[in-house]
Image (tube, rainbow, N blue to C red):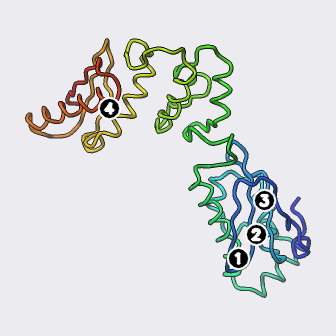
Amino acid sequence: MMTSFKDFTQGLNLSVLENPSVEISSQATSHTLYLKFDSKDVLLKASYQGQIDSWIGSMCSLIEGKKLCELLSLNWKVWDEAFSHDQVYWDLKNDKSDEFFFPALELLKAGLDLFVGREYLYKETDLLICRCFGVRENDVLNYIRSTDDPTPEGLATFSKAGMGCRSCVPQLTKWLSINQPKKDLRFYKDKSRVHWILEIDYMLSCFPEALDWKMEVESFQGNQVMIKFDKEVSQKEEEEVALRLQDFLADSLDTDLSFFLIRS
């Protein structure tokens, strides 16, 4: 059951939140909003500082327990539904225009923008590494600690990290390499096929023509990597790009690997 709106006029949720995921202040209203999320991007707790504001205070209660995606679409009508039978709420609302609700929502929106812009930084030891599957730094470290031979495929099985957009692959590769036995990491046979596909796919995304040509790894057999593309180009242009691609990927990954372009 929702708390009475009268409680918010008396300062409910007016407090400093320890170790918040987000702390955002408004110069216009001199309020500070605190938001604390869990590892699944669900808002655990919200509070504020400044003069008593029943709208910010009530918002803090309304948004607790909601997922980030729900918070991004929050609108002032949520108040009407939550306090539909609360006369104190309606009395206060009737004294104000609908615009009165916007300062609280704008402060929340700014806090969520900060939350997303900081790459979901909760604290130094709990950084979101793989956004696609919600894998955090501690998840990766727990996997590394649980095995004597950490591998990309093992990590993927353990947490699915690196199996989505793969933008996290460089960081994952760095951690896994640090925890591998000392050996020549540039020789392709010393790494698993899954490991190489992850690295090749990431480096391919850095190649200038990759996006326009819709390049994708088609196959990886032995030391030969076939990369398909889907773009109408001349034979000469294809040969020129293929040579540059070979040099770019081989120098970045392993000179023992050969890369070939094939039409989709």
Q: Measured from the top left, where is residue 189 in percent x and y? A: 39, 12
Q: Quadrant of residue 194?
A: top left
Q: Measured from the top left, where is residue 249 in percent x and y? A: 30, 30
Cα–Cα gap, marks 2 and 4: 48 Å
Q: Which mark is residue 216?
A: 4
Q: Which residue is mark 2?
A: 79
Q: Look at the numbered disc 1 and give the secondary structure of its residue.
A: helix
Q: Earlier in the sequence, mark 3 or mark 2?
A: 3
Q: Which residue is mark 3?
A: 46
Q: Which residue is mark 1?
A: 101
**Amino acid type shown at disc 4:** Glu
Q: Earlier in the sequence, mark 1 or mark 4?
A: 1
Cα–Cα gap, marks 1 and 3: 17 Å
Cα–Cα gap, marks 4 and 3: 44 Å
Cα–Cα gap, marks 3 and 2: 16 Å
Q: Quadrant of residue 148?
A: top right
107 versus 198 height, above or below: below
**For this rendering, which residue is in front, 255 or 113?**
255
Judge from the rendering whether residue 75 lies leftward or rightward of residue 205; answer left or right.
right
Task: Name the residue: 41% across, 28% down.
Answer: 199
Check disc 2: other Cα within 10 Å, few if <14, some if 14-19, many if 20+. some
**For this rendering, which residue is in front, 133 or 149?**
149
Dot 1 and dot 4 residues touching (CB under 8 Å): no
Task: Name the residue: 50% across, 37% down.
Answer: 168
Q: Look at the numbered disc 4 and give the secondary structure of its residue.
A: strand
